[in-house]
Amino acid sequence: MTLQTTTYLIVGFTFSIYIGIAIWARASTTKDFYVAGGHIHPVANGMATAADWMSAASFISMAGLIAFMGYGGSVFLMGWTGGYVLLAMLLAPYLRKFGKFTVPEFIGERYYSKAARIVAVICLIVASVTYVIGQMKGIGVAFSRFLEVDYDVGLMIGMGIVFIYAVMGGMKGITYTQIAQYCVLILAYTIPAIFISLNLTGNPIPQLGLGSTMVGTDVFLLDRLDLVLRDLGFLEYTTNVRLSTTNMFMYTLSLMIGTAGLPHVIIRFFTVPKVKDARSSAGWALVFIAILYTTAPSVAAMARLNLIETVNKPDGTQLVYAERPTWIMKWEETGLLAFDDKNGDGEIVYSADAETNEMTKVDRDIMVLANPEIAGLPNWVIALVAAGGLAAALSTAAGLLLAISSAISHDLLKGVFKPDVTEQQELMASRVAMAGAIMLAGYLGFNPPDFAAGTVALAFGLAASSIFPALMLGIFYKRMNKEGAIAGMIAGLGVTLLYVFQHKGIMFIASTSYMGDMPQNWFFGIEPNAFGAVGAMFNFAVAFAVAKMTAPPPQEIIELVEHIRVPSGANAPISH
Amino acid sequence: MSKNSSYWTSNLRLVGLCLVIWFVVSYLFGIILVEPLNSIKIGGYKLGFWFAQQGSIYTFIALIFFYAKRMGKLDKEHNVHEDDE
């Protein structure tokens, strides 16, 4: 069977599972639609959260980033996992106790203000829409590269699938498909990693393989990688700091706070039956995430070593261009890998020196996608990687779309404009909002705006600087009032946007960047992507100052805070 | 309310302890003290590098389950746990 046929079969099989689940898990009430009825088992919710959280970026791009950043790439590993500790201890159980459907709903009630709720809706929509563009692009790219259909056609198919299960099933349909998608993506990620670890180190567990010696030698794999990179003139893999210690610190902190503040992740914890389930469910989510996140560093280091040793062979000879393996030819066609035989000797040299380096382009995304081919794995593994990439992108897109549509139908329509809608009308409205959100995401996928590249940083910056502090203060500081919270959110958001825009351009149009994207101009050498934590500090400081100067919140709000601080008396999520 | 306030104080103490460990394994061992720790090796891993790319994540998982278990106990001790249906 050809690779093409195998890929169609495997991807087709996974898609029919997703559609089957959609038909089985239809939503009949708003409670089904927003929080899957509130009775998802904590382990099942952990698995769904893991798929919800791990996007095309985690699946395809992260290992590639680490492969080229080495130790510096640790910011993603720690940042995107450590946020779950904050979520489990500072937010999830209390928001579950509050027992409502959306994040803006909590902010609106806790700060007794429709304005606060609307500010939260805006932050949520901007963060989620920017994030969903990346997923749509991921879906289009995965289709075009593996199934050799047009980017546009691939995107249409992806939208169609999400449409079926998200519009019909809401959170209920999304939860069960996310569980299936987790299984697909984790198999697709770990199977090639196990093979590659076996090939290089003889140890089938990639996490141990990374700390082992190379097959047939007593040289540790990481020492070998450091040595090879040093010889080529690169920085050592294991000590390559990302800009500076301060920058790494702030980058990690921004990603952690941002992770804890992302609404599409938070709402997953509204689906479990009890407060104590919300706590353990965060732990399960992190277990399932960690299976991929602790494998990624092994994939990164091993793929980098494999790539280098394909070109600069360990026996001291170079790759003869005319005899290059077929996977290289395939990736050359996509333009993601390029060579230039500068000295015309027919051999390829890889080096840190731009003058002599002949591997002129290596796109980072290749590292995971080409991994099975580099290791010479069978076709079904390559096909599985395609299905895994699609599962990662689809599951995250669906979670984001639900966060967007519930903010529109529940927070704006029911909460602000038309509080007297009936349950059936609201359910209808949430389906229409979901369909609209899919259309918008699809449109942005077809016409990615100029700022698409910078958007994930923006999503994390917004979540870290606006949503997280407002939620945390709402639970841990009784005295926080609406004036403080709103001023804090606006200050945090403003400072973060200002910093990102002044270095990356207004709305990411590079020519409008009035400070230039230059490290000299960075505040304490902190790169714009790492600025969310500074935004959060601004938020906290402004919120405290304003709250001190204005009237304390009313007595019933103090009682509400006391109520959410204890688990007893919790109900399943209710609409009010 | 005094019953609940001692529950809340115990909760804050527990969260504080967990967040200190959270900070130590990631920011301290994985970033600030990474260089000195790298002089120690476990297998092929430099210790600081291991904390940054593996150890911190394992610790995070252990922390959340430890927290969930201790909070479950606290809930019962202060009689604020949810009814078993």
Image (cartoon, coloured by chain):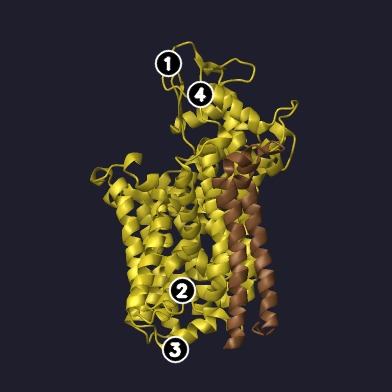
Chain colours: A yellow, B brown
Task: Mark 4 vs mark 2: tell me if same chain.
Answer: yes
Instruction: Determine which residue is flagged by label 3.
Output: A556
Q: Which circle, 4 or 2, is nearer the viewer?
A: 4
Would you call the spot at circle 4 few (<14 residues within 10 Å), some (14-19), or many (20 or more)? few
Q: Residues within 10 Å of mark 2 (few under 14, many from 20)?
A: many
Of labels 2 and 1, earlier in sequence is 2
Please name which of the two marks, 4 or 1, marks the residue nearer to the observer. Answer: 4
Same chain letter for marks 4 and 3: yes
Q: In this rendering, would A331 be left or right of A42?
A: left
Of the residues shown, which amino acid type is indicated by label 2? Thr
Mark 4–mark 1 contact, CB under 8 Å? no
The quarter of the image holding the N terminus of chain A is top right
Q: Position of residue B78 (x, y in %)?
A: 66, 83
Q: Position of residue A162 (x, y in %)?
A: 48, 60
Front tag of 1 and 3: 3
Q: Which chain letter matches label 3?
A: A
- Tell me which amino acid carries mark 1: Lys
Q: Residues within 10 Å of mark 3 (few under 14, many from 20)?
A: few
Looking at the image, is mark 4 or mark 3 earlier in the sequence?
4
What is the number of the mark on residue A102?
Answer: 2
Inter-mark Cα distance, 4 to 1: 18 Å
Tell me the distance, in whole angstroms, between the alpha carbons under discs 2 and 3: 21 Å
For the point 24% across and 43% down, which residue is it? A511
According to the picture, the residue beneath numbered tag 4 turns out to be A233
The amino acid at mark 3 is Glu
Residue pointed to by mark 1: A342
- Chain letter, disc 2 residue: A
Q: What residue type is disc 4 on? A: Gly
Snapshot quadrant of residue A22: bottom right
Give me the C-alpha separation between circle 2 and circle 1. 58 Å
Chain at numbered mark 1: A
Q: Earlier in the sequence, mark 2 or mark 3?
A: 2
